[in-house]
Amino acid sequence: MSERRTEGIATRRRGATLENAITDAAWEVLVEQGYHGFTYEVVAARAGTSKPVLYRRWPQREDLLVATLARYWRPLDVPPDTGSLRQDALTLLRTINAERSRAVVLLRIQLADYFRETGTTFDDLRGRLRPADQTPPFAALVERAVERGELADEPRSARLVNLPFDLLRHDMLMRMGAVPDEAIVEIVDTVWLPLLGVSPHGAQSTRNAKQA
C-alpha cells in the first residue's frame, strides 16, 4: 500500500494501480538517467512512495528493471500472412523500424551500464521479456514459409533466422534512429533470402529446387 498526496488530500494506491505508478516512474528515470541513476531511492521518490514498497515487490534492482521494460517493451506481433516470405519479412522490418527504432537506440545507450554490470547482452534481455510460449517473429515467418512450401524443411540456425533483425538493429545504432526503406529491402533481398536459398521474386533457388 502506498500513500500519495494530491492537492493536499492523501490517496492510497494498491495492487496494479500502485505497481503501474511505480513502473511509470521507473521508466521515466531510466530514460532520463540510464541504469546508473535507476536506483530504488530515485524511483521511489519519483513514484511518491517508499523504498520498502519497491523492495517487497522487486527484491533486486534487475527485477524492477525487467518489470519496467516488460510494461513498455511489448513483444512484436507476427505480421499477417501475406503469402510470401519476402513480403512478410519486409512488413515486419518496416514495423520494427517505424515503432522501435527510437527505443532500440535509447535502451542500448541507457542500459550500457546494466549490460556491463551483469555481463549480459541485448539479446539476453530480449529473451527474458518475450513470453516463454511465444515463437520469435522471424522464426514464425520461416515456419510459415516451410508450411507453404516456399522453403525446404531443413534445420536452420537461430543466427540465420534472426539475421534481418540483427542487421536492422545494427543500422539503427549506426544511424542513431530509423533506417531508410531501401536498406530494409537490401537486407531482405540481397542478404537474407539468398542465404535461405530463396529468390527475392518468390521462387525457390536452384539449390533448394535440387534438394526438393
Image (tube, grey):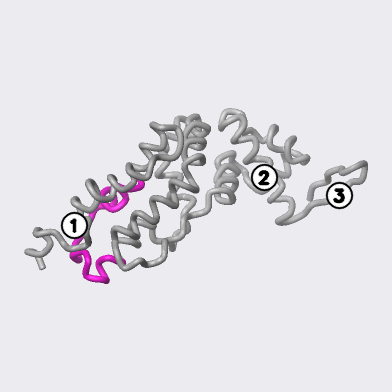
**Nearer-the-camera pick, 55 or 77:** 77
Q: Amino acid at mark 3?
A: Thr
**Picture residue at 56% right of the left edge, 46% below the top:** 69
Which is in the foreground here, disc 3 or disc 1? 1
Figure label count: 3
Q: Amino acid at mark 1?
A: Ser
Q: Quadrant of the C terminus?
A: bottom left
74 relative to 26, above or below = below
Q: Nearer the viewer, residue 152 or 183?
A: 183
Identified at 74% across, 35% down, the residue is 45
Residue that badge 3 annotates: 11
Residue placed under numbered mark 2 in the picture: 24
3 vs 2, front mark: 2
Q: Which sits in the foreground, 102 or 118? A: 102
Amino acid type for the residue under numbered disc 2: Asp
10 Å crowding of disc 1: few (<14), some (14-19), many (20+): some
Q: Could you say whether the residue bearing mark 2 is in a helix, strand or loop?
A: helix
Magenta stretch encompasses residue 151: yes
N-term mark: 3 or 1? 3
* Residue closest to the far left: 210
Q: Is residue 20 above or below residue 172?
A: below
Rendered residue at 57%/45% (across/down): 63
Residue 148's x, y, as percent? 26, 71
Work out how far the residue at label 3 is from the one at label 2, CA to CA, in angstroms. 18 Å
Alpha-carbon distance for marks 2 and 1? Answer: 46 Å
Q: Which residue corresponds to mark 1?
A: 199
Answer few, some or many: residues within 10 Å of disc 3's Cα (few below 14, many 20 plus, some between 14 and 19): few
**Which region is colored magenta?**
144-165
Instruction: Give the spatial CA distance, label 3 vs label 1.
Output: 62 Å
Q: Earlier in the sequence, mark 3 or mark 2?
A: 3
Is there CB contact under 8 Å for labels 3 and 2?
no
